[in-house]
Amino acid sequence: LPKIEKVTLEEALSSAVDRHARISSTEVRTGFRNIDWSAPAALKTVAYRVVQEALSNALRHAGGSGQTVLAVRTATRLRIIVSDSGPGFPDSAVAEKDFGLGLTGMLQRVLAADGDLRIRSVKGKWTCVKVTLPLDLPT
């Protein structure tokens, strides 16, 4: 992500969404609030990779159905929610953290940034990845 230092967080996330939509020929709805600022490069990188991987999973496992990316900045945190309306997976997989390499890598990246990752899924209905990151990641 060589240009990530020169763009706002909103531009970085929009780039991840646009690239995914173009490559996959799927629609992704977005909702961004209060993220048009020059966030630290480390935060933009983690956020970009989270969106990239979560959308990739939505395409792989849900056929890209009902993909949505929401991002909101509060006073101290960035919250990202990526969801789809695909087939979901059993609650036991979430409870046991029975993840593939992509979700495992995402979880490790988020935890290394002192963030939190939660996954909710209803089999046959939807999956939602919620990530919360501190705003003060070092550059």
Image (cartoon, helix red, strand yellow):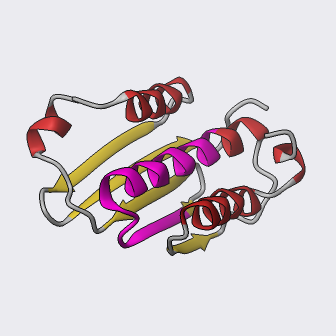
Image quarter of residue 23: bottom right
Camera-nearest residue between 26 and 16: 26
Tally the marks. Answer: 0
Secondary structure mostly seen in the magenta stretch: helix
At x 36%, y 62%, the residue is 63
Instruction: Please provide percent x and percent y for residue 13.
Output: 66, 58
At x 53%, y 23%, the residue is 112
Residue 53 lies in magenta, yes or no? Answer: yes
39 shown above or below 137: below
56 shown above or below 134: below
Camera-nearest residue between 18 and 106: 18
Would you say 80 lies left or right of 91 here?
A: right
Instruction: Please provide percent x and percent y for residue 35.
Output: 68, 63
At x 50%, y 71%, the residue is 26
Name the quarter where the C terminus is drawn: top right
Q: Residue furthest right?
A: 6
51 shown above or below 45: below
Instruction: Please provide percent x and percent y for residue 66.
Output: 37, 73
Camera-nearest residue between 93 and 43: 93
Would you say 136 lies left or right of 26 here?
A: right
Would you say 23 lies left or right of 122 here?
A: right
Camera-nearest residue between 6 and 62: 62
Residue 32 lies in magenta, yes or no? Answer: no
Would you say 56 lies left or right of 60 here?
A: right
Instruction: Please provide percent x and percent y for residue 111.
Output: 47, 27
Name the quarter where the N terminus is drawn: top right
Span highlighted in magenta in the image = 46-71
